[in-house]
Amino acid sequence: MSKILVVDDSAVMRKIIKKNIKESGLLVDEFADAGDGKQALDVVSHDNIDLILCDWNMPNMSGLEFIKILRSLNLPKKIPVVMITTEGSDSKKSEAKDSGADGYLTKPFTPEQLRNALGSYILVN
Ligand SMILES: [Mg+2]
């Protein structure tokens, strides 16, 4: 059983990400959605999430702020977080890593790139 939390302020983008995950052969049982970092924190506190895919730029609470708070919480298990963003610069990548992100994926991505980015956290068909 695996449940992925998809965090993005665009509902269309969340839909695309979920569609790509399904098509990439990753074994996911369930999805949860959040429109910003605040909603994502709420989901994480109530739900058993195995992996988080997180947009960078969002209103209310950005992806980076979300990861920093998430990593400061005393959760029973460490949930892997993969950042998804349009900005693929090295400084952005290291900023994400320093804040506690486990992986990084640049938009737009292919199902294969998605599979490579998530394959170490979710079983692949
Ligand atoms: Mg966004």
Image (cartoon, helix red, strand yellow):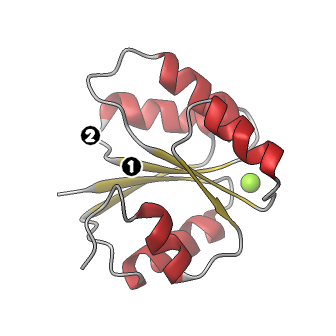
Q: Quadrant of residue 110?
A: bottom right
Amino acid type, mark 1: Leu
The residue indicated by pointer 2 is 48
What residue is shown at x 82% (from left), y 54% (from top)?
Answer: 89
Q: What type is the residue that disc 2 sits on? A: Asn
Q: Is residue 84 visible?
A: yes
* Label at residue 24: none
Left or right position of 68 against 78: right
Q: For the residues marked 2 and 1, what is the alpha-carbon distance in whole angstroms?
A: 10 Å
Residue in the picture at 61% in, 48% down:
35
Residue 91 vs 3, above or below: the answer is above
Relative to 92, is 119 above or below?
below
The residue depicted at 63 percent of the width and 42 percent of the height is: 36
Disc 2, SS: loop
Vertical position of residue 114 compared to residue 58: above or below: below
| Mark 1 lies on residue | 51
For image coordinates 28% across by 73% down, the residue present is 124
* Mark 1 beta carbon near ligand 1 (under 8 Å): no
Can the viewer see residue 18 in this picture?
A: no
Q: Is residue 2 left or right of residue 94?
A: left
Camera-near label (2 vs 1) is 1
Q: Quadrant of residue 11?
A: bottom right
Indicate the position of residue 113 as horizontal and vertical percent values.
Answer: 55, 75
On the rendered structure, is 91 left or right of 19?
right
Determine crowd level at label 1: few under 14, some 14-19, many 20+ residues with C-alpha closer than 10 A: many
